[in-house]
Image (cartoon, rainbow, N blue to C red):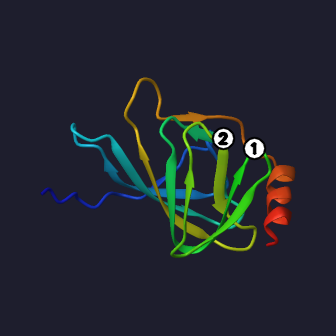
Amino acid sequence: MDKNPRTATVKTPASNFTGDVWMNPVFNGDGSSQLTCALVRFTPGARTNWHSHVNGQLLVCTDGVGLVGTRDGKTVVLRAGESVWTPAGEEHFHGGTAENMMCHHAIFDASGDGAATTWLEPVTDAQYSAAHNAAGV
């Protein structure tokens, strides 16, 4: 068993996020495992760009209220204690609602050839607003 040290909070890159998003890396694999986990905090209105993961991604909300949306217009509201699985290759975004912060653990398997995450273009304000409307928040 290995205890991992506490990590510093870092601001996420504006090239992959809209708004103020902060992250604490939790685990980045150990040589035998490529499991990756980060604690991510979104301020109201903040969100990821569209992106996908080669092996899927598990989002576990720890605090607040957030949205997870897919390219086909499906949107779910994510609240503390709830989780969402995005399958391998599914383009999606996640973040806080317009009025609420959201904090989640983002967990994925980074094994395989190439990048574990494929980052795409920003979610537009119109797409974000449509996700809000679809989710009823």
Q: Left or right: where does residue 43 sit relative to residue 4?
A: right
Q: Quadrant of residue 96?
A: bottom right
Q: Amino acid at mark 2?
A: Glu
Residue 81 versus residue 91 in the image, above or below:
below
The answer to whether 56 is drawn above or below residue 115 in the figure is below
Identify the residue at horizontal 60%, vertical 35% (top origin).
119
* Residue displayed at 44% across by 47% down: 108
Sequence-wise, the earlier of marks 2 and 1 is: 1
Q: Secondary structure at mark 2?
A: loop
Q: Is residue 56 visible?
A: yes
The residue carrying pointer 2 sits among few (fewer than 14), some (14 to 19) or many (20 or more) residues within 10 Å by Cα, namely many
Apparent side of residue 49 relative to residue 9 in the rendered image (left or right): right
**Which is nearer the eye, 90 or 45?**
90
Q: Are marks 2 and 1 in contact (CB under 8 Å)?
A: yes
Alpha carbons under labels 2 and 1: distance apart: 6 Å
- The structure residue drawn at horizontal position 32% and vertical position 57%, both measured from the top left corner, is 7
Q: Secondary structure at mark 1?
A: loop
Q: Position of residue 124 (x, y in %)?
A: 80, 47
- Could you say which quadrant of the image residue 76 lies in? bottom right
Q: Circle 1 is placed at which residue position?
A: 71
User: Mark 2 — residue?
Assistant: 91
Quadrant where the image shows the C terminus: bottom right
Residue 48 visible in the displayed image:
no
> Between residues 106 and 6, which one lies in front from this camera angle?
106
Whether residue 111 sits left or right of residue 20 in the image: it is: left
**Above or below, 118 relative to 3:** above
Whole-percent x, y for residue 106 in the image: 48, 55
Q: Going 65% across and 67% down the picture, which residue do you hit?
A: 66
Q: Position of residue 53 (x, y in %)?
A: 53, 39
